[in-house]
Image (cartoon, rainbow, N blue to C red):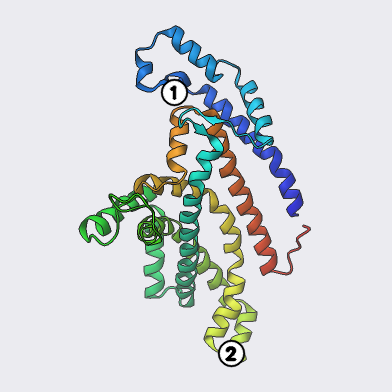
Amino acid sequence: MAGRRLLAAVPVLAAVTFGVFALAAASPFDPAKAYAGSAGLGARQDVLDQLRDNLGAGRPFTARWWDWLTSALTGDLGVSASLRQPVAQVIGERIGWSVLLCGIAFALAVTAGTALGVLAARRRGGLFDRAVTSLAYALEAAPPFWLGLLAIWLFALKLDALPAGGLTDTGSDVATPGQIASHVVLPAAVLAVSQLPWFVLYVRQGVGDALAEDPVRGARARGLRERTVLLGHALRSGLLPVLTLTGSRVPELITGALLVETVFSWPGIASATVEAATKVDFPLLAALTVLATAAVLVGNLLSDLLYGLADPRVGFDG
């Protein structure tokens, strides 16, 4: 199954990059003016035309896409016209910080969501259940950037407890582990809170349904402790839908991370993505899109593998 998924990912990634070049070609933004910046505002048309030829923007987008694709297969992702750096270097300098942020946030969301969902499912309809589900629905409707601005206002401005953004303290040129730890708290917490409602609601529903099943009732009838019944029987059965949810949340996690990174000036791939989109940076746009698409495909594959491990009835060759 994993091999077939990986083979199927190849045409998907190729089609996605083709779509990126097609959309960028249809964009009203002029790559030559974007590359020239403020100097392009008063430049002569012949200068802009020459610059456009140098950038290859005058060629058909299919030719640009094919050249980029064949070069990418050899490891050459091209040069970013907006950041004036090799695309591989742009991604390499930023991807680690984005992975750190997303990894911490995702772990927090899964852990807290599972705990709250189990406690809410234990007595559905109770006060704690109603409070948790109401909060989950409220957070589900809250945009990540709004949560980020609210967190900055409260914890950075009002309480002065945590840094408002960035990676290092003001005036510091070296990112020490202590500074990174303190600066990642707010963005990771905000990103985790934006993903939390889905896990809470799915765990609550899954565990609540499992508690009403005959095997769990039989475990209770045999006199097993409530904790054993809840964690050993109901939780394992109730977590199966959550494993599927894990992969489907990857696109939302990536989108949320872009917004959170922008709000907190986190040095991840968000700034590069915005720069590539506004300046029609074909090579960087294609590489970042491939990266995001690959993350979604890997997330879906991981969900299937985890589901198969959790439920032996599911075969890996299906």
Q: Quadrant of residue 112?
A: bottom left
Sooner in the amino-acid sequence: mark 2 or mark 1: 1
Q: Residues within 10 Å of mark 1 (few under 14, many from 20)?
A: many
Frontmost residue, 305 versus 84: 84
The front one of 56 and 27 is 56
| Residue on which the image places disc 2 | 224
Q: Residue at x 34, y 12 (%)?
A: 42
272 with respect to 56 (left or right): left
Quadrant position of the C terminus in the picture: bottom right
| Rendered location of residue 215, percent (x, y) | 65, 80
Q: Using the rendered image of the protein, determine whether residue 193 is visible from the camera's viewpoint.
A: yes
Question: Mark 1 belongs to which amino acid?
Answer: Tyr
Dot 2, crowdedness within 10 Å: few (<14), some or many (≥20)? few
Please give the residue where the numbered disc 1 appears in the rendered image.
Answer: 35
From the image, state whether disc 2 or disc 1 is nearer to you: 1
Asked if residue 201 shows in the view, the reply is no
Q: Position of residue 31 (x, y in %)?
A: 47, 22
Q: Position of residue 317 (x, y in %)?
A: 78, 58
In the image, residue 59 above or below residue 96: above
Q: Amino acid at mark 2?
A: Leu
Quadrant hosting residue 183: bottom left
Q: Residue at x 46, y 59 (%)?
A: 105
Quote the CA–CA distance across marks 2 and 1. 69 Å
